[in-house]
Image (tube, rainbow, N blue to C red):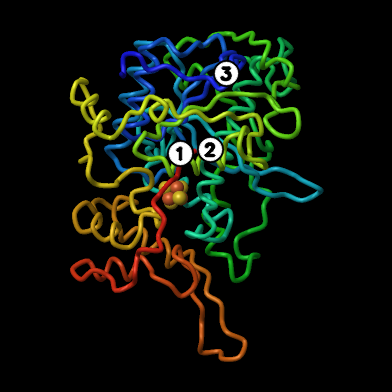
Amino acid sequence: MVNQMRINYLHHSHKNYPHVVKFSGGRSSAMMLLALAENNQFDVSRGDVIIFNNTSAEHSKTYEFVVKCKKFIEEEYRIPFFIIEFQTYEDAWLGRWRRAPTYRMVKPYPYKKYKKRKSYGYRHQGEVFQEFVSWKAQLPTRFTRTCTEHLKLNTSTRFLEDWFGRCGGRSTPRYLPELSRKFANPRLGHYYPESQMPKPSSYAGRSEKVRYHLEQSSYRDAQMYTHYTDAPLVDFENEVIKDYVYDFKANLRGDEPLKFISLVGLRFDEPIRVTRTLARNNTAEAKGRLADGEFVYAPLFDSELTKEDVLSFWKRQEFDLEIPHNVNLSNCVFCFMKGAGAIQKLASEFSHGAGPGNIQWWADFESKYANRVQSRENKQRVSFFGFFGSNALTYKKLAQNLENSVKENSSGFLPCECTD
Ligand code: SF4
């Protein structure tokens, strides 16, 4: 079955659209990628690309696996695979300074803070997650999953606007004198030596919440694609893309968007996830998406491949994800969407280190960024808005009750479906 895995196109024209693999870092997604590559389903001259959105809160073994898959796919199949992250930069807008969201490409090794030089590795200690929450000055919750929206969906879309924009001509923009946009994304942000943003103290009650993102770099460097992939950078001349590129930016939204295929690693035994993802992201089925020309395909589902098939596939490979297959450590390790019972189980068996791999990090983070609102009628009453909603369960409570499972009914929790 794996040897014959093909993409079952809804329409023959879809074959010409560039293909984007939204790599989640899990076994299913990786198997889909490897099987499609093995079956020659990619074509780099079409604009095909693989992206992994780093939230900086994934398990350390997930990062190792992502790096191995990236190396393998770039060396064996010469397909570019980028690890990208959300970041903000200072930008003047309507006469005021603000921190605007963008993305950066990162290298396949962990980020380290040096005194005198920059590190270009991926963040893995919650830094990206924290920059996002500090920028919003608000926690995502299980009712408003703003982290999925900003760290994954929007970040992918921004990267793809530039990636497909490479198709946009040969002129050299003024802000990149020595480089062409075909080979690099542009520098973003001002050139002042100091931040132009108001000081954290001017945000009154929110000063400690906004501080972290205000302390980040005011700009994003221009980035050469070839610094972030070992696959050769092929100049794609895809007619399907060209008409949608203006000034090196592809138009992915609106009535006349660029059309592309995105491939997600959802399996045959996950029909509800497939239905939800198609309903949310697929241009054929849903209106009002972030990328309006996106056609989502789930080749594992179409090939009727289940979890057993995925596990047996990885038994035959030279490397594997070094996380037991029966525990849910995918995506952000202690994601609030996983449910109280699952979080506690993970915490009691797998909590480790000082970062997001430890439930205590989530408890401290929630305590720092939760909003507390005093009741008007009764000043003694303060409502707490955490990851789980107002005056609901907290990570502190979960961490304190590891031996006794929490009393709250966790049946209302949704499975973590942070699919791009
Ligand atoms: S895995 Fe959970 S916490 Fe992480 S981005 Fe997705 S919804 Fe948010």
Among numbered discs 1 and 3, the one appearing first in the sequence: 3
How far apart are the two marked residues, 1 and 3, measured between alpha carbons? 21 Å
Q: Is residue 321 above or below residue 182?
A: below
Nearer to me, 29 or 75:
29
Q: Position of residue 309 (x, y in %)?
A: 26, 28
Q: Which numbered circle lies on residue 274? A: 1
In-image side of 39 versus 100 (left or right) = left
Q: Residues within 10 Å of mark 3 (few under 14, many from 20)?
A: many
Among numbered discs 3 and 2, the one appearing first in the sequence: 3
Residue that lies at the very extreme toward the right in this rendered image: 95
CB under 8 Å between discs 1 and 2? yes
Mark 3 or mark 2, whichever is nearer to me: 2
Q: Residues within 10 Å of mark 1 (few under 14, many from 20)?
A: many
**Which residue shows up at 50% across the image and 16% down it?**
226
State the quadrant of the N terminus. top left
Label 3 C-beta lies within 8 Å of the nearest ligand 1 atom: no
Amino acid beneath label 2: Leu
Q: Residues within 10 Å of mark 2 (few under 14, many from 20)?
A: some
Amino acid beneath label 3: Pro
In what element is the residue under mark 3?
Answer: loop
